[in-house]
Image: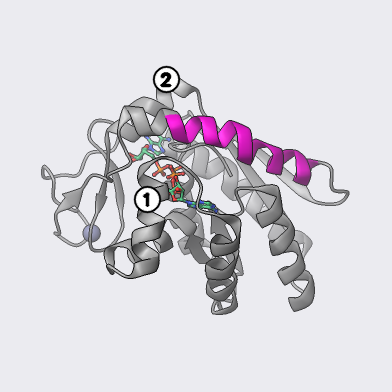
Amino acid sequence: MGPPGAGKGTQAKRLAERFDMDHLSSGDIFRAEKDSGSQLGRKLGEYMSAGQLVPDETVVEVMAGAITRCTAAGGLLLDGFPRTVPQASALDEQLDKAGKPLDAVVVMTAEDDLIVKRITGRRTCGKCGKIYHLTFMPPRKDNVCDACGSELTQRADDTEQVVRERLETYYKQTEPVIAYYRDRDGLKVIDVDGGGEADDVLAEMVVEFDKLRANC
Ligand code: ADP
Ligand code: ADP
Ligand code: ZN
């Protein structure tokens, strides 16, 4: 969990690879639906471009289906979901029924000014989804993905104006989810400063994930 630009997608991809986990990003799932041009996709696009949350009922339905299809041996890493308390309780219910408890919650933080710099400079590969930054994590060749050679694109909602909306939404609707998890006995909450160097942030998380592995 963490505000836009904290580095959730960047680190989730690396962790998922390292620990053989499925990685589900609700934002990526919604953008793919939007790009498909479906009626649902058009509806999702309206919320996303305004920096508002997609209604819980839709989110829970889409994410429940996606979670059910995950099979990786190392488990599942959720990125961007849940983002409201009702979404978190729907997830609890689904995981309880499946007998697969939540092992940990990772909370990443970053200062608002840094977030704006990160978000406005973010570029993503349209084909493989690799995440770059114009100055912090540039590709070797301008606008071309190092991994697959495709063109990089900028998300429509990655403007300063929309990111400020998304931050407001985050503080109002998503921070309470963190409190909801902190209050739970026996659930490990891993706090990480997302403002550091990407390799250092990853290393910190790997230490914590190794500990979790050792305990299960
Ligand atoms: P970020 O990288 O800024 O954290 P995401 O890619 O996770 O952004 O999400 C982009 C947009 O998709 C959000 O602003 C919101 O409109 C929608 N969205 C993603 N996940 C959720 C969710 N769990 N609940 C509601 N809306 C969501
Ligand atoms: P989130 O999924 O939390 O919205 P991303 O992982 O997409 O965040 O990262 C947002 C932007 O910041 C991207 O352009 C990414 O390349 C860059 N970024 C991520 N982590 C770091 C870091 N530790 N240092 C510098 N830039 C970073
Ligand atoms: Zn690529």
Describe residue 52's horizontal placement relative to residue 88 as left or right.
Answer: left
- For the point 63% across and 47% down, the residue is 207
Q: Where is residue 27 drawn, in percent x and y?
A: 43, 54
Callout 1 environment at 10 Å: few (<14), some (14 to 19), or many (20+)?
some
Q: Is residue 28 above or below residue 131?
A: below
Q: Is residue 49 above or below residue 194?
A: below
Callout 2 environment at 10 Å: few (<14), some (14 to 19), or many (20+)?
few
Q: Note whether ligand 1 is within 8 Å of mark 1.
A: no
Q: Where is residue 4 drawn, in percent x and y?
A: 46, 38
**In the image, which disc is placed on residue 5?**
none
Stretch in magenta:
165-182
Residue that mark 1 sits on = 46
Real-space Cα distance between discs 2 and 1? 26 Å
- The quadrant in which residue 165 appears is top left
> Is-magenta flag for residue 177?
yes
**In the image, which disc is placed on residue 113?**
2
Amino acid bearing label 1: Glu
Q: Extreme right residue here? A: 185
